Image: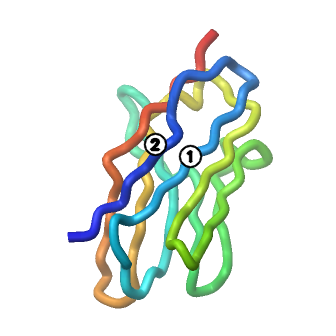
Amino acid sequence: QVQVVESGGGLVQPGGSLTLSCAPSGTIIGIHTMGWHRQAPGKERELVAQATITSGTTTVADSVKGRFTISTDNAKQTIYLQMNSLKPEDTAIYYCRYTTWYRGDVYWGQGTQVTVSS
């Protein structure tokens, strides 16, 4: 069973930057989307940014637009999230999520903690 694994979380001061990455443990056939979601304490999980591989388009949540950038290395099936100008309200567990057109599979990572605090 292929798993997707995030890395790059941690503690950063307000205004700082972090880069998250996510890669599968094996090859995923027929990737449709690769994206990032987050869940803050007491809140629902929300979409942060997503790349639709089949159309070459990206979607970024309004709350992070202009500060976060999503990018992909399609050959490595790896996804990145460059986070700049971080705010305390960005504190959450960040999850990567892959979907496929092949069978409609959904892969979730285990999550990586991002804490923005002085």
- The residue lying at 63 percent from left, 85 percent from top is 55
Residue 64 sits in quarter? top right
Q: Is residue 30 left or right of residue 16?
A: left
Q: Are marks 1 and 2 in contact (CB under 8 Å)?
A: yes
Label annotation for residue 7: none
Residue 28 sits in quarter? bottom left
Q: Among all residues in the image, which is located at the extreme top?
A: 118
Closer to us: 92 or 72? 72
- The residue lying at 42 percent from left, 39 percent from top is 112
Closer to us: 79 or 99? 79
* Residue neighbourhood size for the residue with mark 2, other residues' Cα within 10 Å, grouped as few (<14), some (14–19), many (≥20): many
Q: Among all residues in the image, which is located at the extreme right?
A: 66
Q: Position of residue 40 (x, y in %)?
A: 43, 32
Report which residue position mark 1 lands on.
20
**Mark 2 is on which residue type?**
Tyr
Q: Is residue 76 left or right of residue 112?
A: right
Which structural element holds mark 1? strand
In which quadrant is the N terminus drawn?
Answer: bottom left
